[in-house]
Image (spheres, rainbow, N blue to C red):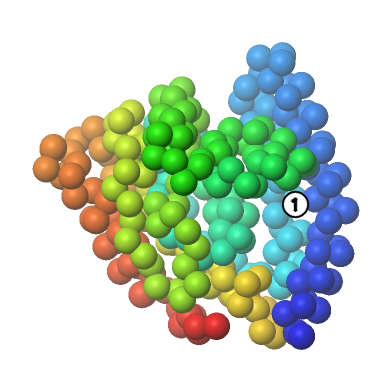
Amino acid sequence: MKKRIRVTIGIIFIAPLFLVLSLLAMILGYLLHLLHLERASEKTVHFLLDILIAWIFFCLGIRLSVEGKENIPQWGKKVCYIANHQSMMDIPVLFGSGAWCGLVAKKELFRIPILHGLLSILKCVAIDRSSLRASLKSIMKGVEQIESGYPMGIFPEGTRSKTGEIAEMKAGAFKMATRPKALVVPVVLKNTRQTLEAVDSFRIVHVYVRILPPIDTSLLSDEEMKTLHSDVEAQIKEAYAELPGPYVKR
């Protein structure tokens, strides 16, 4: 009951601002894009969505703590963020931490009208995980974005964890970083599931993000490339265990 009340109240207050700021971000973003003012378009979209994310956090009672912001590479470099996946709130939390990027997201999200436009202006890529060929095509589209200097992000577990345990990270997802020789930035997210899917009270929810030092894949040997996915997985699991707020299975 508490979950339903909290989520319902949140949606009631979030929905109007989501519609207004999302539409404004899309209109201004596309307009500046048409004028070939790419960086201005990106900054405008991020500014408006920063306001929206702050409002979402306020309405859902989320207090965000971020470590390692200094590890976010300069905009324009070839970057791929790799994060663990627990909740639908992972995306706003990732952006709220300053790690702006296009994301590889499941195709179902692109069927939602306004969200489709928002994901498109953020240069997100739809992926059909039921088809290996379609998945590879999506990864290659992400590679093109990275090579153009626009950072991308992916959740290599492939699905949200319902237990708090980090699942095996798929090696194939890392091709989006290794093909363009990008910087891999591991990002650790903790307690995001307790903000929505596993919420059980009206208390403030503390969400923790730790951004780990980038790994320059252009400097890795062939052998290091082969173990990159397991090495990043180990780093994320180690940092996850160090962050406060023990996860409660629900």
Category of crowding for the residue at label 1, using alpha-carbon neighbours closer than 10 angstroms: few (below 14), some (14–19), many (at least 20): many
Residue 123, horizontal then vertical, whole percent = 58, 33
Image coordinates for residue 238, horizontal then vertical, percent: 30, 69
Q: Which residue is mark 1?
A: 52
Q: Position of residue 145 (x, y in %)?
A: 48, 28
Could you say whether the residue bearing mark 1 is in a helix, strand or loop?
A: helix
At 18% across and 44% down in the image, what residue appears?
226
| Quadrant assignment for the C terminus | bottom right
Of the pair 194 and 208, the residue shown nearer to us: 194
Q: Using the rendered view, name the quadrant where residue 131 is placed.
A: top left
Quarter holding the N terminus is: bottom right
In the displayed structure, does residue 25 sit left or right of residue 158?
right
- Displayed quadrant of residue 187: bottom left
From this view, report whether residue 62 is shown above or below residue 142.
Answer: below
* Relative to 61, 218 lies left or right: left
Q: Measuring from the top left, give residue 126's x and y in whole percent.
A: 55, 38
Query: Would residue 134 be seen by someone viewing this image from the given angle?
Result: yes
Q: Going 64% across and 47% down the picture, which residue do you hit?
A: 109
Q: Residue at x 70, y 55 (%)?
A: 53
Q: Is residue 149 visible?
A: no
At label 1, the amino acid type is Leu
Q: Find the residue positioned furthest to the top.
A: 35
